[in-house]
Image (spheres, helix red, strand yellow):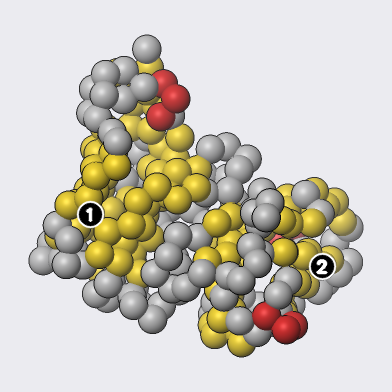
Amino acid sequence: DTGVSQDPRHKITKRGQNVTFRCDPISEHNRLYWYRQTLGQGPEFLTYFQNEAQLEKSRLLSDRFSAERPKGSFSTLEIQRTEQGDSAMYLCASSEDRDTEAFFGQGTRLTVV
Amino acid sequence: SQKIEQNSEALNIQEGKTATLTCNYTNYSPAYLQWYRQDPGRGPVFLLLIRENEKEKRKERLKVTFDTTLKQSLFHITASQPADSATYLCAPLRSWGKLQFGAGTQVVVTP
């Protein structure tokens, strides 16, 4: 097992385009998280899954953001009609359970031009 | 709503000294508290977990305390080294809750 994998590592897109990121968690990890991080800030919670169920989505998140985790394995995060303010590092993490350590991927850096 | 606060100013410290970081939380009672280290351009890496019934936890040169009365955790790096320079994040969690982080405190250890 090579840890949490995110794809792509970098994405440059034009404003108004849709983008989709993928996260492959560590196998058998039940929890999967998505975060957004900008320079000098801590990871901002976006959403999380317990197996295939999406348990919570940040109220700060607009309807342009959607995430899925079909069959409780990999997850995708889609941003529709991207805006320049969406430029950030998007991090994915997985953990066995709620009180165990989370393992992070390397992140996807999104730049909206 | 629940709030997590960490020192926003960078902590500059001389090699060999002890660095002490603070994490305060309000409006909830976490059952666990985790600390992570993050280097520039990389995802956070787990360091320590402490439970509400534990006052103190140690791992090598790291020590964490958890005071549920003060709603505070202290994170200590003893005998600090330049390689300890990074941003340190705390994450207090409810037993059923999500993993949510403070803004982090940057530590800079100079030789």
Left or right placement of residue B66 versus residue B81 in this view:
left
Name the foreground residue: B65 vs A29: A29
Q: Looking at the rendered structure, which numbered label has been put on residue B73?
A: 1
Q: Looking at the rendered structure, which numbered label has been put on residue A45?
A: none
Q: Are marks 1 and 2 on the same chain?
A: no
Choose top left, top right, bottom left or bottom right for residue A27.
Answer: bottom right
Q: Residue at x 17, y 52 (%)?
A: B56
Category of crowding for the residue at label 2, using alpha-carbon neighbours closer than 10 angstroms: few (below 14), some (14–19), many (at least 20): some
Q: Position of residue A111 (x, y in %)?
A: 78, 51
Relative to A3, say whether A24 is above or below. Answer: below
Marks 1 and 2 in Cβ contact (< 8 Å):
no
Three-letter residue code for mark 1? Ser
Name the foreground residue: A66 vs A105: A105
Q: Chain of mark 2?
A: A
Choose top left, top right, bottom left or bottom right for residue B50.
Answer: bottom left
C-alpha span from label 1 to label 2: 37 Å
Choose top left, top right, bottom left or bottom right for residue B59.
Answer: top left
* Viewer can see residue A60: no
Name the foreground residue: A3 vs B17: A3
Three-letter residue code for mark 2? Thr
* Viewer can see residue B29: yes
Category of crowding for the residue at label 1, using alpha-carbon neighbours closer than 10 angstroms: few (below 14), some (14–19), many (at least 20): many
State which quarter of the image contains the N terminus of chain B. Answer: bottom left
Relative to B71, say whether A109 is above or below. Answer: above
State which quarter of the image contains the C terminus of chain B. Answer: top left
Q: Residue at x 57, y 37 (%)?
A: B40
- What element does badge 2 sit on? strand
Q: Looking at the rendered structure, which numbered label has been put on residue A20?
A: 2
- What element does badge 1 sit on? strand
Left or right placement of residue B47 versus residue B51 in this view:
right
Q: Residue at x 50, y 43 (%)?
A: B38
